[in-house]
Image (cartoon, rainbow, N blue to C red):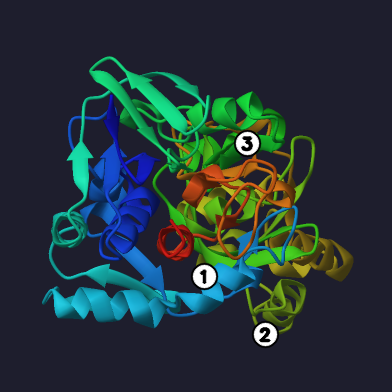
Amino acid sequence: MERFDAIILGAGAAGMMAALTAGQRGRRVLLLDHADKPGKKILISGGGRCNFTNVHTAADRFLSANPHFAKSALGRYAPQDFIDLVDRHGIAWHEKTLGQLFCDGSSRQIVAMLTDECAAGGVDIRVQHAITAISKPDDFSVTTDRGTFAAPSLVIATGGPSIPQMGATGFAYDVTRQFGLKVVEPRPALVPLTLSGEAMMFRGLSGIAVDSIARCGKQSFHEASLFTHRGLSGPAILQISSYWRNGEAILLDLLPGRDAAAALIAAKRERPRTQIRTILGELLPARLAELLAEPLGLNGELANIADKALGAAGERLNGWRFVPNGSEGYAKAEVTVGGVDTAGLSSKTMEARKIPGLYFIGEAVDVTGWLGGYNFQWAWASGVAAGQVL
């Protein structure tokens, strides 16, 4: 049996960050993964360019049963800290909308950077190791199909079940329960939503994107929405999906920043002989305008449509109500909401309060960021928090 100071399960963003941090502190670290190479989920992120952080990172951009839990780690490892690391490796990057930072080149550069940093810390990275058992007779013992390893510290960085085609599973939750800790019910997040009933009419608009505000409860996001053959996607919908629960309604403002009712009534005053479909076509993409005319109950010249009807139509355009019948699930979800209950973890070190030496980091934990680099920043920050004390 080989012995180490720490064993980290999961060679993704959080796991590699914890490993390189501990390794560079002189710890003997083993980083295990069942995949054939480290950082596989990083490689596909950001369209292959890795949206590696967001300059607007703050705890209120994360969902958790304990909204304060993420503050400690995020406060001690900020976006600028990761940017400095990226700069030291000569990786060119650029800022897109809403504070999102991407590589100019490829996400492979981020994986190479993390791999090089692990090497600098003497981290032993072993891939294609399927874990068959974990026990704690004294130190932690990890049995794989290629040998057994032991260490006084064990870090679970295996993520959540989102994107199962990349090998993602609920392994972290199994370990959590094995050691008597609690799991906040996981569900897909940052995921396209599916439609049924009257809302299925939107499927005919597949491929059309509109500027919009998506609202669910008190939460709203002003970004693009994309109509798909199954329902709705796009940044605004992905964002609001993290807050949406089955049975809840979503309101979609198709004319953000404009009073649609006032615009329609004003058009009637100025151009009474104009067809309503013409006016809608000036406000919205042509196919969307054509599709909405009938359910809005509008037809013919503006002069023949009562102000009350125009006002009601305008209100719907500023808040089209629909109830999704579900989402596209973990297969299309970028992340998972829920996970290891933070009530059982130290916010400073990510260590389980009842099981000394056991740590949970990254997406496995009940901390889920908004779209746009926030989840990577949580991975880096939580990884460093654990790596500094291993």
Task: Report whether 112 appears left or right of 270.
Answer: left
Q: Is residue 233 visible?
A: no
Q: Position of residue 68 (x, y in %)?
A: 71, 67
Which residue type carries mark 3?
A: Arg
Q: Earlier in the sequence, mark 2 or mark 3?
A: 3
Look at the image and tell me whether residue 55 can be seen: yes
Q: Give the CA distance from mark 2 to mark 1.
A: 14 Å
Please rate how many residues cluster around mark 3, counting C-alpha atoms within 10 Å: few if below 14, some from 14 to 19, many from 20: some
Residue located 16% across and 79% down the image: 88
Residue assigned mark 1:
282
Please give the label number shown on residue 270: 2
Closer to the camera: disc 2 or disc 1? 1
Counting residues from the N terminus, which is met first, the one under dot 3 or under dot 1?
A: 3
Q: Are marks 3 and 1 in contact (CB under 8 Å)?
A: no
Q: Are there few (<14), some (14-19), or many (20+) residues within 10 Å of tag 2?
A: few
CA gap between label 3 and label 1 equals: 39 Å
The image shows residue 123 at horizontal and vertical percentages of 21, 50
Front residue of 301/161: it is 161
Circle 1 Cα neighbour tier, 10 Å, few/some/many (<14 / 14–19 / ≥20) = few
Spot occupied by residue 364 in the image (x, y as percentages of width and height)? 53, 43
Helix, strand or loop for disc 1: helix
Q: Secondary structure at mark 3?
A: strand
Q: Is residue 32 left or right of residue 228?
A: left
Along the horizontal axis of the image, is 365 left or right of 295?
left
Q: CA distance from mark 2 to mark 3?
A: 50 Å
Q: Residue at x 82, y 68 (%)?
A: 311
Cβ–Cβ under 8 Å for marks 2 and 3: no
Q: Nearer the viewer, residue 223 or 137?
A: 137
Residue placed under numbered mark 3 in the picture:
187
- The three-letter amino acid code for the residue at tag 1 is Glu
Q: Secondary structure at mark 2?
A: helix
